[in-house]
Amino acid sequence: MAEEKKKLSVAEILAAARAEKAAKAAAEGAPAASEAVAEPAPPVPAAEKPQPAVKPTVAKPGAGAGKGGRMSVAEMMAAARAEKSKPAGEPATATPAATPIAAKPVAPKPVAKAEKPVKDEPMAPVEKETGSILAAARSGVKPGPMSKAEAAAKGVPLPKPAAPAKPKAYVPPMPQKPEYAKPKIKPAVTAESRRGFLEIMFGSMLALGFTCLALVGGLWTLGFARFMFPNILTEPPSRFKVGFPANFAPGQVETKFVAQFGVWIVNYEYQGQPEIYALRTVCTHLGCTPNWLEGEQKFKCPCHGSGFYKDGINFEGPAPRPLERYAIRVSDDGQLEVDKSKLFQEEIGQWVDPASYVVA
Ligand code: FES
C-alpha cells in the first residue's frame, strides 16, 4: 500500500497512459484513441479542486475522467503539468489521474495522500551555482545550474571561489622637502656667459701654457750656459818662485806665502845642517792650519793644540808626526822655486833627499 500511496511521477503517468492507450487500441481500434483525443477534458488544478477520497478503481464521470471512467492521455498530461507547476510548499492533493489507471495498483495513491495529507514543510531555497554550468559543460555533464550537493553527487568540480582581495596598506604621504634639501636650480647658461667662460678658461690656460713654456725654455738655456761655462777653481800653480836665497835670513820663518800658497819658507838647520826648506801649512793631526808663534818659536795648531818646532818636528798635542815639506830648488834665474807636487815626510827619512831642501 505504501507504493500505491506514492505520488506518481510524470514519466510513470506517461508510461501508464501509453500502456493504456496501446491496450485500448488493441481492443477497440484506432477510433477510440481519436475520440479520446477529440474530447480532451479541461485541466483541473488539484490545488483549486481538492478531491476527496476517491475509490481506487472507478472514477466519477464528469470529474475530468474520460470514457469508461478512465482519463485520457490529454487529461493525464494536464494533471501532470498541474502537479508539476504546483508550488513546493503546497500540500499534495489527489489528482484524478491517479484513479483512472485500473490496470496498475498505483492508481489509488492520490486517495491515500488525500486521507493523510502531507505536511506542508517549507523547503529551504537551494542555492544554485552558476559556475557549475561551465564546469559541467567541461566535464561532459549536461550543463545547468546546480547546487553544491548536486555538483558533488555528479562529480562536477566547482570553481574555487576567488581569494578575497588583500586590503591595500595605507601609505602616508611623504612630507615636503625642506628648502635646503631641494635641488638648487642652476642659472641658465647663455651664449655670452659661455663665451666669456671659454675665453677665460682657454685664454688663461693658453697664457699659463705659454708662461710655463717660457720658463722651461729659460731653465734649459741657463742649464746649457752652465754646461758651457762650468765653475773653474783658480788654484795657484803647483810651482812658484819665492825669491832669492839671500832674502831669507838664518833662523827666519817667512809667513807671507801662507795665504796664497800654503807654505812657510824657513831658513834653519836640520840635523846640524843649515837649509832652506818649504813646510806645508797643514797639521798632521786633522788638517787644521797651525800658526807660527814668533815669541815661542813654534808652530801651534789652534784646533787641538799640537805644537811643532821650527824645523817641523811635532812635540806636543795629538799630532802623530812632523809637518811635511814641499820640493824646493834654485831655479835658472837664481830664485828659489817651490814645487807643491812633491811631498817629503820626515818619519820615513825623506827629508834627507836633496830635493827637499836648499843648502843655505
Ligand atoms: Fe792640529 Fe788637531 S788639527 S792639532
Image: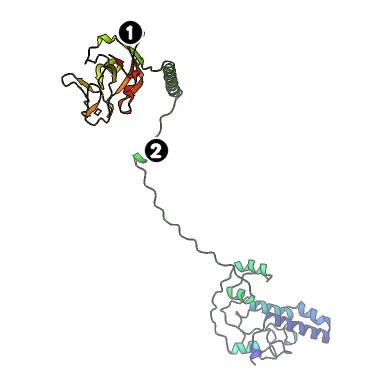
**Is residue 143 among what the camera can see?**
no
Real-space CA distance between mark 1 and mark 2, rounded to the nearest whole angstrom: 102 Å
Q: Nearer the viewer, residue 277 or 209?
A: 277
Measuring 44% from the left and 27% from the top, which residue is drawn there?
189
Which residue is tagged 2? Answer: 183
Q: Is residue 122 above or below residue 238?
A: below
Q: Which picture quadrant has residue 274?
A: top left
Q: Which picture quadrant has residue 42?
A: bottom right
Q: Is residue 172 above or below residue 353?
A: below
In the orientation shown, which residue stands out farthest toward the bottom? 1
Q: Is residue 248 above or below residue 39?
A: above
Mark 1 against mark 2, which lies toward the viewer?
Answer: 1
Tell me residue 289's x, y (percent). Answer: 25, 23
In the orientation shown, which residue stands out farthest toward the top? 333
Q: Nearer the viewer, residue 285 or 348?
A: 348
Colour mapping used in the image: rainbow
Q: Nearer the viewer, residue 242 or 354?
A: 354
In the orientation shown, which residue stands out farthest toward the left? 295
